[in-house]
Structure formats: structure tokens, C-alpha cells
């Protein structure tokens, strides 16, 4: 990297006649000039502005570049999640990321970055910070989440912090063009901006690897599209079943695969049912099941988002529960399936479509089929579809067709508590089964097609922790402990 001080001194020497670095040469025999000890060493003075360029020390330029590159890298890492929600938002993240990387490259390549370059960088990043503030307070002004304030997560707080720091540093350099130029000649201090730049990149790496980054496209979450709930008396995290294991068989098996903290997964289960065992199917049975599941994917294609389901008359049933998702259902005769036979007509009419959140753009994850049969239905081809039921369901039927579940399912509230919430107690539900066959949700080897829960349906922070049951009445959209 070119030494900025040597360049400046060479230019100054040419004018003053200084050829030895100690100031203008005195005529022969002239007395030595007085030196003021308080004036300091000229070699450590800030450099002058030459034209429109700023003689900024390399360390400061490295810090500017590090801040911008780190923010840009995080933006690019988040593109797939946002592109899946709304293409325009994904493109905006892509352009923002590339702009920030380009700014970092320009600042590094130019030993004297122009004032225009710094001003553009500061203005653009100030705009990015302002846009973030709007989406976290009033919500985006347009798009599928228009008017809905988004939660702040570690990943976006990190990025906005990097951008704000860049704005402040760029403005400081514009105000004092020679900012920190002397640091390059001072032991230890000269390395500070570079070390900070390395720390900035490390912080960005931690943010990208965090659970909030993984779920960021959903709110997280992730995260904002994660919680769980069952139909008018369907599934529920925290339920118990006939196996009396204290947790769902699928949840227990999945928890065993995770060393240490299972993030609350072991606490999830879903109603009363026989033990779930996945059997290998013969070729004929597998082919029949594949045909049935193909019909469910037709339903997924018809109603890919919550907005599509609501437009077709489906309404929210219960909150979003971790592991179980958000259910949007209908209760016309076509969805009740009294004989429990899963023919094409029955498959086209699930009682509930399960989504990964409750927002209009939330994506379909699976289905919940119901049968009013007196005995456990024959259901799908093969023995793997273990059906369940619930007891003591406290349900609040709303005028708009939605159904709240203020105290969950399976004896989690008394009749008095249910009545006080304006709801009514249902002694026992019909038979139900979850089917995780929606594209993108059907390829997890740890989640059976008819599994009790789906481990990818987490809360915004990547866990499965739920609020205490007494708080559910005040959180009808989701019961996750993490902010929604």
C-alpha cells in the first residue's frame, strides 16, 4: 500500500526546498530556527486535503472497508430467505449487499478516497438504517407485510450497527480529512483500526451463524413465521398420549439426536395415540401411498400461502405452536370424512392446511386430515399413519370464522377457566392425522410423513419453548416464548 505521508512530503519538498525531511533548508550560515517544544513533531501532524481527495490513514480506510464488507456479506447471505418470501425484497438485499462490497473495494483501492465516494457511502448507509427503522416500527410501506412491524433480531441489529458505525466514521473523515493519518507512525495505535476491522468481520460471521439468521426470512424468524397449533381441537405442543412417555415418540427420537440442550423439543407431543413406528412398505403399498401424497401436493400448489388459503375460505384455528405450525381450516361436509377412506375427494379437502406462520406470506408445510369415524380410520395406504385425538378442548369460536384455543388441549384448563375466557369445552375431538407432504417440508429424514411434530417448525429464536399455559389467552396468534 502506498505510504501517504511519503507522497505528501515529496510534494511539499518540491515547493519548499526541503530535501532532508526536517523542513525548508536554511541558507548557508543562517542561524538555526527556533523550535517550540510544544508544537509537536511535524511527522505526526494530520495531512492536508489535496483537491477533493482525503488523505485518510490506511487503518481508517481498512476500518471503513471492513464495516461495509461485513454488512454487505450479511445482506448477501440473507438473499435466499428474503427472495423466497418476496422477490422484490430479495433483489433489494442483493443490490444492497453488492453496493456495500463495492464501496469497501473502492475505499481499499484508493489511497485517497474522494469526498464524493465517502459522501455517497455515508448517505446510502444512512438510508439503509432509516429503512430498517421504519420496518421495525411502522412496518414496510408496501409488499406482503405492508404495515406489519417486524421484530428486531441479532442478525439485523448487527448489520444496522455496522452501517451506523460506517456513517459516523465517514462523516468524521469528511469533517477532518486527515483523520488518524498520524496513527500509521505510532506503534500499537496504528494497528487499532485494522484490529477493529477484523473484529467487525468476526461479529458479522457470528450474526450469520446465529439461529435468528437461519429463521430470518420467516420472521425469525423466523423467525416471525414460527409457532404451532392445531385445528379446532387438533394438535398441540405439550399434549400427552396413550404411550405415556411424557413426550411424543417423534419428538423424543429427534431430541436424542441432539447432544446437550434440545431447545425444548422433548416437551412437544400431540394428543392421544398409539406408539408411532415407521414400517417399511412393500412396493405396491408404497406406490399407492405415493399416489395419495401426490394429491396432497396438488392442494399445496392451490394454497401455497396463508393469503391463498384465506381467500378460499380457510380460517385460523388456534395459534402457531412450535413443532406443529399454524392451522387454517374449513368445516364443511367435504372436510369431515365420516368413513375415514382417503380417496381423491377426501385428499383434496383436508380439514386444515398447516403453515409455517400466521402472516399472509407464510408458506404451506403440511396438512391435517380429520375423520368423524367412531373407530380409528383406515386412512392412508400402509400402517404408518397413526391417527390421534384430543380431550377437553377449550375452543373460542369467533364471528369471523377463526377459532382461538385459549388454554390448549387435553385437560390443560378447567371448565371454569374456559368459560371465563368466553370459550366452551369440547369433551373429545374426532380423529386427526398430520401429513408433512408439502414440497420443501417432505425431505427431512428425521421427520416421518405422518410424524407427530415437524422439527423445522421452530420459534423465531430457533427453539421450541412455549409460554406458560396461563399466558396463552393473551397470545392467540402464537404461543412461543421468543418474541414474535
Image (tube, rainbow, N blue to C red):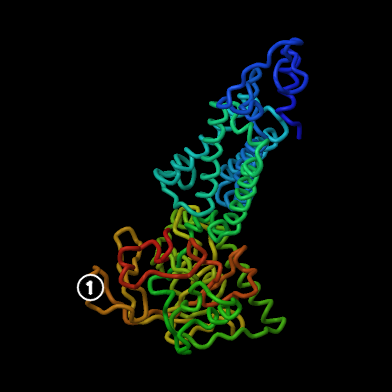
Residue positioned 42% across, 59% down in the render: 483
Percent position of residue 295, x then y: 60, 67
Note whether 281 is above or below 155 in the view shown: below
Residue 152 is at least partly visible in this image:
yes
Q: How many marks?
A: 1
Note whether 471 is above or below 129 in the view shown: below
286 on left or right of 340: right
Percent position of residue 416, x then y: 22, 77
As rendered, which of 259 and 96 lies closer to the eye?
259
Note whether 408 is above or below 114 in the view shown: below
274 on left or right of 60: left
The N terminus is located in which quarter?
A: top right
As rendered, which of 320 and 204 lies closer to the eye?
204
Percent position of residue 304, x then y: 54, 57
406 on left or right of 197: left
The C terminus is located in which quarter?
A: bottom left
Residue positioned 35% across, 62% down in the render: 402
As rendered, which of 90 and 235 lies closer to the eye?
90
In which image quadrant can residue 32 be found?
top right
Sort mark 1 into few (<14), some (14-19) or many (20+) by Cα contacts within 10 Å.
some
Percent position of residue 482, x then y: 43, 63
Residue positioned 46% across, 78% down in the render: 267
In which image quadrant can residue 34 be found?
top right
SS at badge 1: helix
As rendered, which of 414 and 29 lies closer to the eye?
29
Residue 94 is at least partly visible in this image:
no
Q: Which residue is mark 1?
A: 419
Note whether 399 is above or below 392 in the view shown: above
Amino acid at each position: 500500500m502506498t505510504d501517504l505521508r511519503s507522497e505528501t512530503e515529496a510534494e511539499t519538498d518540491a515547493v519548499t526546498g526541503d530535501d532532508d525531511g526536517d523542513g525548508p533548508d536554511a541558507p548557508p550560515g543562517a542561524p538555526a530556527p527556533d523550535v517550540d517544544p510544544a508544537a509537536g513533531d511535524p511527522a505526526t501532524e494530520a495531512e492536508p486535503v489535496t483537491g477533493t481527495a482525503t488523505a485518510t490513514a490506511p487503518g481508517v480506510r481498512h476500518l471503513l472497508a471492513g464495516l461495509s464488507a461485513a454488512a454487505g456479506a450479511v445482506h448477501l447471505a440473507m438473499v435466499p430467505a428474503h427472495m423466497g418470501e418476496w422477490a422484490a425484497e430479495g433483489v433489494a438485499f442483493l443490490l444492497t449487499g453488492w453496493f456495500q462490497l463495492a464501496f469497501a473495494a473502492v475505499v481499499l483501492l484508493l489511497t485517497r478516497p474522494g469526498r464524493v465516494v465517502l459522501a455517497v457511502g455515508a448517505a446510502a448507509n444512512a438510508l439503509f438504517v432509516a429503512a430498517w427503522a421504519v420496518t421495525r416500527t411502522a412496518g414496510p410501506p408496501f409488499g406482503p407485510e405492508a404495515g406489519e412491524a417486524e421484530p428486531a433480531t441479532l442478525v439485523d441489529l448487527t448489520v444496522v450497527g455496522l452501517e451506523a458505525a460506517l456513517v459516523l466514521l465517514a462523516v468524521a473523515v469528511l469533517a477532518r480529512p486527515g483523520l488518524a493519518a498520524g496513527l500509521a507512525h505510532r506503534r500499537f495505535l496504528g494497528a487499532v483500526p485494522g484490529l477493529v476491522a477484523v473484529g467487525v468481520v468476526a461479529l458479522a460471521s457470528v450474526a450469520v451463524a446465529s439461529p435468528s439468521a437461519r429463521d430470518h426470512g420467516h420472521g425469525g424468524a423466523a423467525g416471525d413465521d414460527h409457532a404451532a397449533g392445531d385445528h379446532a381441537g387438533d394438535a398441540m405442543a405439550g399434549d400427552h398420549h396413550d404411550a405415556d412417555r411424557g413426550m411424543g415418540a417423534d419428538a423424543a427420537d429427534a431430541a436424542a439426536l441432539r447432544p446437550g440442550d434440545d431447545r425444548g423439543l422433548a416437551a412437544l407431543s400431540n394428543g392421544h395415540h398409539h406408539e408411532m413406528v415407521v414400517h417399511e412398505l412393500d412396493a405396491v403399498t408404497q406406490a399407492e401411498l405415493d399416489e395419495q401424497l401426490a394429491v396432497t401436493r396438488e392442494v399445496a400448489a392451490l394454497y401455497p400461502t396463508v393469503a391463498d388459503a384465506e381467500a378460499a375460505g380457510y380460517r385460523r384455528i388456534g395459534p402457531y405452536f412450535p413443532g406443529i405450525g399454524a392451522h387454517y381450516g374449513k368445516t364443511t361436509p367435504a372436510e369431515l370424512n365420516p368413513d375415514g377412506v382417503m380417496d381423491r375427494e377426501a385428499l383434496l379437502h383436508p380439514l386444515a392446511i398447516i403453515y409455517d406462520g400466521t402472516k399472509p406470506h407464510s408458506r404451506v408445510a403440511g396438512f391435517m386430515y380429520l375423520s368423524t369415524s367412531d373407530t380409528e380410520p383406515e386412512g392412508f395406504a400402509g400402517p404408518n399413519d397413526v391417527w390421534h385425538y384430543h380431550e377437553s378442548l377449550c375452543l373460542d369460536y369467533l364471528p369471523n370464522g377463526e377459532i382461538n384455543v385459549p388454554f390448549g388441549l387435553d385437560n390443560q384448563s378447567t371448565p371454569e377457566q374456559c368459560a371465563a375466557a368466553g370459550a366452551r369445552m369440547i369433551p373429545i375431538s374426532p380423529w386427526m392425522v398430520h401429513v408433512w407432504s408439502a414440497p420443501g417440508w417432505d425431505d427431512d429424514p428425521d421427520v416421518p410423513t405422518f410424524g407427530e411434530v415437524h422439527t423445522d417448525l421452530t420459534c423465531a429464536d430457533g427453539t421450541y419453548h412455549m409460554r406458560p399455559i396461563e399466558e396463552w389467552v393473551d397470545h392467540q396468534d402464537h404461543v412461543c416464548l421468543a418474541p414474535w
